[in-house]
Image (spheres, rainbow, N blue to C red):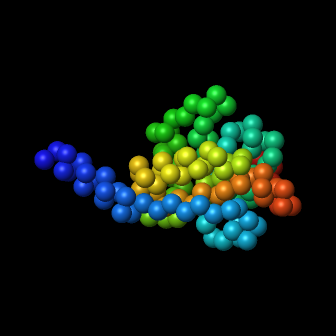
C-alpha cells in the first residue's frame, strides 16, 4: 500500500511538472518571465547580470549545493504553477538543475541554453551585480 501511495505522489508531481529547453535570445529576455541566475556571486560580479533577474546561487565555487536553502529562496520568487527561467554561464548547470526542479518538485522550468555567455556574445549589455 505504501508503494502505491508513493507512486501516486511521484506521478502526480510529474503531471504538473514542465521543462522546456530554449536558447537564450534578446527576444526571450523581453518576455514577462522571471529569470533566476544560479551562478556564483563571483560570476555575477565578473559578467554582470540580466536586468531584472533574480540571483540565487545553486552550486558554490566548489560545486557544493544546499537544495533546501535554494528552494526557500526560490519559493519567495516564484510559485510552483508559474513558469520561470533558469540561467547560468553556458547552460550546463541549468540543464541539470532545471530537470531536477521539474521532475522532483514539479516546477515549471525553462532552461536557458547558452547562458549569459551566449547573450553577451550577441551584444546584450548586462547590468552590474551589487
62 versus 7 height, above or below: above
Does residue 80 appear in the picture of this structure? no
Direction from residue 21 to residue 29 in the image, left or right:
right
Residue 63 is situated, as x and y percent measured from the top left of the image, at: 61, 32
Q: Position of residue 8 (x, y in %)?
A: 24, 55
| Residue at (62, 41) in percent of width and height | 57
Extreme residue in the left direction: 1
The residue nearer to you, when weighing 95 against 106, is 95
Does 76 sit left or right of 129 as displayed? left
Q: Is residue 35 left or right of residue 97?
A: right
Point out residue 71 in the picture as x, y percentages from the top left corner: 48, 45
Q: Is residue 43 above or below residue 32?
A: above
| Above/below status of 87 relative to 70 | below
Q: Is residue 21 visible?
A: yes
Is 28 left or right of 125, judged from the image as shown? left
Residue 25 location, quadrant: bottom right
Query: In this view of the protein, which residue sits in the foreground, 63 or 21?
Result: 21
The residue positioned farthest toward the right in the image shown = 123
> Which quadrant of the figure contains the C terminus?
top right
Q: Position of residue 43 (x, y in %)?
A: 75, 40
Residue sitting at 78 percent across and 42 percent down?
Answer: 45
Q: How many marks?
A: 0
Spot the residue most to the top: 62
Amino acid at each position: 500500500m505504501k508503494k502505491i501511495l508513493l507512486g501516486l505522489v511521484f506521478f502526480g508531481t510529474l503531471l504538473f511538472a514542465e521543462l522546456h529547453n530554449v536558447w537564450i535570445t534578446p527576444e526571450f529576455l523581453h518576455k514577462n518571465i522571471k529569470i533566476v541566475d544560479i551562478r556564483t556571486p563571483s560570476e555575477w560580479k565578473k559578467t554582470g547580470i540580466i536586468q531584472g533577474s533574480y540571483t540565487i546561487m545553486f552550486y558554490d565555487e566548489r560545486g557544493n549545493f544546499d537544495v533546501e536553502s535554494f528552494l526557500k529562496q526560490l519559493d519567495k520568487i516564484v510559485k510552483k504553477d508559474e513558469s520561470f527561467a533558469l540561467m547560468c554561464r553556458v547552460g550546463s548547470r541549468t540543464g541539470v538543475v532545471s530537470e531536477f526542479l521539474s521532475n522532483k518538485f514539479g516546477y515549471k522550468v525553462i532552461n536557458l541554453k547558452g547562458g549569459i555567455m551566449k547573450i553577451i556574445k550577441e551584444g546584450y549589455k548586462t547590468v552590474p551585480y551589487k
